[in-house]
Amino acid sequence: MAIDFDAIRRDYPLETVVAKVVQLRRSGANKVACCPFHADKTPSLVLYKDQTYHCFGCGAHGDVLDFVAGTQRTSISGAIRYLTGGNAPVLDEIDQQRRAQEMRQREAAQAKHAQDAVQGARSRWQRALPVDGTDNAYLTRKNVAPYGCRREGDNLLVPIFDEQGLIASVQSIPPEAGGKKLFHAGAPVKGGTFTIGDAKDGPVVIAEGFATGATVQMATGHLVVIGFSKGALKRTAELAAKRYPGRAIVIAADVNGVDEAQAASDAVGGRVALPDLQGADGTDFNDQAGHYGLDDVAAVFAERSPLPLAVLSPADWHGKKPPEREWKVEGLVPNHQATLLTGAGAAGKSLVSQLLCTCAGMGVDFLGIRVDRCPTLYITCEDDNDELHRRQQAICDGLEMSLSATRGHVHLLSLYGEMGNELCTFDEKRTLVTAKRYREIVQTAIALGVRLIVLDNTSHMFTGNENARSEVAAFVNLANAMARDIDGAVIIVGFPNKAGDSYSGSTAWENQVRSRLFLETPKNEDGVVTDPDYRVLRNEKANYARKGTEIGFMWKNGTFVLPPKAEGGAPVGHQFSDQHAWYALTEIDRRWREGNPFSASHIASERFIGTWLQQRFKMSRAAASAQLKAWGAAEIIVSEQRNSNSKMMGLRVKKWPDQPCGSSAEVNR
């Protein structure tokens, strides 16, 4: 039995399906949205009442099945399974015959309508009058030659030819600035072009509209093929490459159609030419000619060897404000990049990763650090669903939210016990080959709208040689590609090595990522863990932020929390709780061992311990001073010369007080 496509389109309305992917708004009789098939900043996707859509930016069009197939990166049959859950409606033989007859009748009516529309367009062209010189207001305003166009009243009439060289439609352009350009109703425009100039050699220029094409032809003498929209640039370029084999293809882009122009150029191995407006108003080459003349336009198209790579010119940024850097976690996890998170076993990497995903998904601070709210996906290869449940319950309890509140915001995936979790393999030439699991993760993330993925961990997902620099670099680049594809960020969870370095294997792990985080349970100078509940998350590499940023926090009731504070922000207890004291002493000890000790003198500015205590624990100056005096009197901390080779004086923990009670070393890795 055949699938009942009409029933699918009826039962799964296009508007309902599209609204789950992009935000819709009304525009006249239709709904519009930013197109999910290209980088669309202004709505160019239009939904029509006949249950079809069309993007005037990239040319994507179709019905609900085409939309699902495109967004889910699958086939039409895959789209049917996605919508119906595998239970697609079917037609019996009588229904099939009836539908086939209706289809033939519809197609015949549509063909007759299109044929009548083409004849109507041709009749308009025949009735139109020739343009004498530049007596048309539009041509005068644009300062271009008519190139065989005609006039219909005050409007300019531009012919649109099919592949056989016959007129298929016409475009009517009003004289006033901002007037609406109209194609003949019902006549096909797709695949239609208008060629101006007769150069037998040299490059072929592809342009969006008539004024741009005419300007370029007048400036360069090149053959110009006009496609009538930026969405048609790629198709027009491919047609020109077939029609004029061996000739270079140059795409004359408008400044608001660079992406479409680049796609067209990539399709035919051409190059993109951008108008050099030098800060002046305008968007295209006609505007450039109006400001600086035709010679200035000709200079842009001057013959040069096409570059095999898309090189940027800083001059193109003149007058433009650099975009703000985007973070998923402020100062720690940059957007559109892969971040490496490492830490020894039992440090709590999985717990902190799931907590981070929950905070980002729900838009709450991650241990006091601002996050960019977005849907998240935490993927583990080592914990089953029950463990994820236990951990998530503890996390939600700590954040004082219900599990139900996370629906649609936080997604968890256990691959525990499954085979084939590697994201890539390496062939005999050690070239990276993406694996099925990588494609499944990206497709799932895009379908859910996920913008932050945690991959836990490299032992399962990276099967290359961690000591081979090229393989590590290729894997990190693959993770960067994943971040780019989801328009978000990726965190890779890894391990330190046996020697104590904060990452294992090749230094490519350190060199390739733009940010690397390290989670540890601090130890004193004797290598003893002073508080099994205390953790430090430190940024050990930060290309885009200050290196050394760190967060101190505690394990409590199965999750991580900041050290407690009383009302007003003062530490719990008289001056310090036991937990606060151990935290502060651990930090003093770490700074001493790393060669950048705190100082007891306020003259030391950033190293002054009093300032740090006040800022970290919201203490008054008097309270911080009293605490330091108490520690000094008990000889818990002393001020000493750092070493014989340095005159730097610093604070060292001389003896440790009794370990605080109530600690628990049981932390999920």
Image (tube, helix red, strand yellow):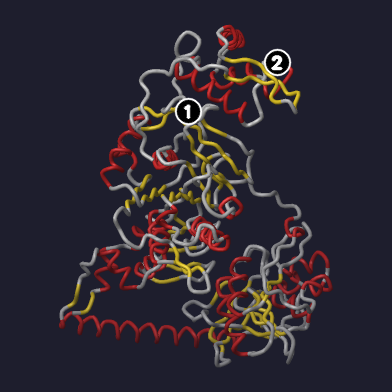
Q: Nearer the viewer, residue 158 or 268?
A: 268
Label 1 near label 2: C-beta < 8 Å? Answer: no
Q: Is residue 367 left or right of residue 557?
A: right
Mark 1 is surrounded, within 10 Å at the Cα level, by few (under 14), some (14 to 19) or many (20 or more) other residues, namely few
What residue appears at the point 66 percent right and 85 percent down from the top-left corner? 195
Q: Secondary structure at mark 1?
A: loop
Q: Label 2, label 1: how many angstroms apart (C-alpha)?
A: 29 Å
The picture quadrant where one finds residue 71 is bottom left
Query: What percent of the width, then of the height, locates residue 651?
Result: 64, 19
Query: What percent of the width, then of the height, locates residue 618?
Result: 55, 17
Q: Nearer the viewer, residue 45 or 426?
A: 426
| Mark 2 lies on residue | 601
Whether residue 14 is visible, yes or no, is yes
Q: Tell me the quadrant of the picture where the C terminus can be found.
A: top left
Query: What percent of the width, then of the height, locates residue 122?
Result: 55, 87
Q: Nearer the viewer, residue 488 or 279?
A: 488
Q: Amino acid at mark 2?
A: Ser
Whether residue 40 is visible, yes or no, is no
The picture quadrant where one finds residue 393 is top left
Count of numbered circles in the view: 2
The picture quadrant where one finds residue 225 is bottom right
Q: Nearer the viewer, residue 522 or 579?
A: 522
What residue appears at the point 41 percent right and 83 percent down from the top-left corner? 113
573 relative to 490, above or below: above
Mark 2 is surrounded, within 10 Å at the Cα level, by few (under 14), some (14 to 19) or many (20 or more) other residues, namely some
346 relative to 143, above or below: above
Tell me, for residue 45, which label it has, or none: none
Q: Tell me the quadrant of the picture where the N terminus can be found.
A: bottom left
| Mark 1 lies on residue | 528
